Image (spheres, helix red, strand yellow):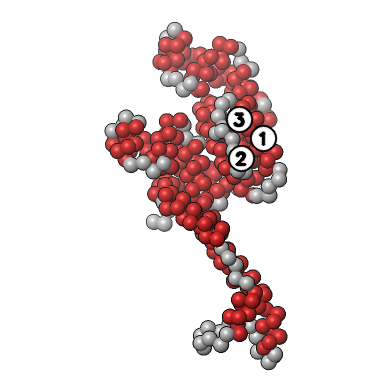
Amino acid sequence: MMIEKLLESYELYKNELEADLYLLQTMLQQDMPEPSGDTIELGRVLKHLKGCADFINDAAVDHRLKHAELRFRQLSYLDWLVRSRASEEQEVIKALWLDRLSLSEASDRFYISKSSMYRKKQEVLSALEAVFSSDRTAQTLWNEMEQTETI
Amino acid sequence: MDSVKKVKEMMRSYPANVARMKELEQEMAQFIPITASEVLEMLTFPGKSGDEVRVQKQRSNNRIFYIATSYRRLAWLINHKTEREMTKEYEKAAKAVEFIRYAIRALPCFYRDLMTYDILEGRRWAEVCERFSLSGAEFSRKKEEAVKRMAKTLERQYQYFGFRKEELCDDD
């Protein structure tokens, strides 16, 4: 499933966004603490750096900003997707993909059997996949990324 | 595309590249461009037969006129060439250093700390193993995994760092 791949990449996207912001801080000579925290916090840093980059004409900075913006939009979308689910489903997503627990670890957390946990996982994935495949904006967002990465 | 090999090569040359960048920064800061009068002096100085600089077109015998119009340009060209050479060398080292810093920053927390301590801080093998409580073999395995992840970052983002696709190809 496409959505499963994306949820598995959540950590990678977040790390890359943090690295983008860190590199931009260095490029723009901004004396700030290392970017970390949730997507909203990283978005604030990105906005600040974008403001600083307005006065700079550098292709490397522009490329990096473009990449950071895309990662931010992708992370925001995934955050929204998770938050739009019922709280029980959110807990499952958090355990399996954000906290990266194995099926048996997650089943221990929810006091259910491993097969029930697997069923829950499949239900959540199907629901998310349905939303994702019907949302054209989201698909454009990921296609845009692929196009950018194969310049 | 042999990105793993390229990443390993960049990691090996990281300390040398950082040192070279510092050297070049210093060189560029202390660079005194050649002045037009120095060029004029050089052009009018007789020198040996192999030292002369051609500034005259053959159709004219008015040597002084051509020297007068070209010595300023010659001064600019000499300075420009020197600056370009330094910038080119700096860029080559900088893109490798920038990539290594970025790719390490983009690693998951444990690998990031491990590679920062090992590569960016340049600690010795034994120090890294002791700090992270790893055996030599375990450390090698973790490092290999980190390199694989960094190689994937390179494959996805090589163009952002100014690398060309051909640079990532295996020579063999």
Outermost residue to the top: A111
Mark 1 vs mark 2: give the one in front. Answer: 2
Give the crowd class for mark 3: few <14, some 14-19, many >=20 residues within 10 Å: some
Q: Give the image location of residue B7, x and y in percent.
A: 43, 47
* Residue in the foreground of this view, choosing between B2 and B105: B105
Would you place residue A58 above or below residue B110 in this image? Answer: below
- Residue pointed to by mark 1: A48
Quick check: marks 2 and 3 in contact, CB under 8 Å?
A: no
- Residue pointed to by mark 2: A30
Q: Residue at x 34, y 36 (%)?
A: B128
> Which badge, 3 or 1, comes first in the chain's sequence?
3
Chain of the residue that carries numbered disc 2 in the rendered image: A
Quick check: marks 1 and 2 in contact, CB under 8 Å?
A: yes
Labels 2, 3: one chain: yes
Q: Residue at x 58, y 80 (%)?
A: B42
Give, as a three-letter code, the residue at label 2. Gln
Mark 3 vs mark 1, CA separation in Å: 10 Å
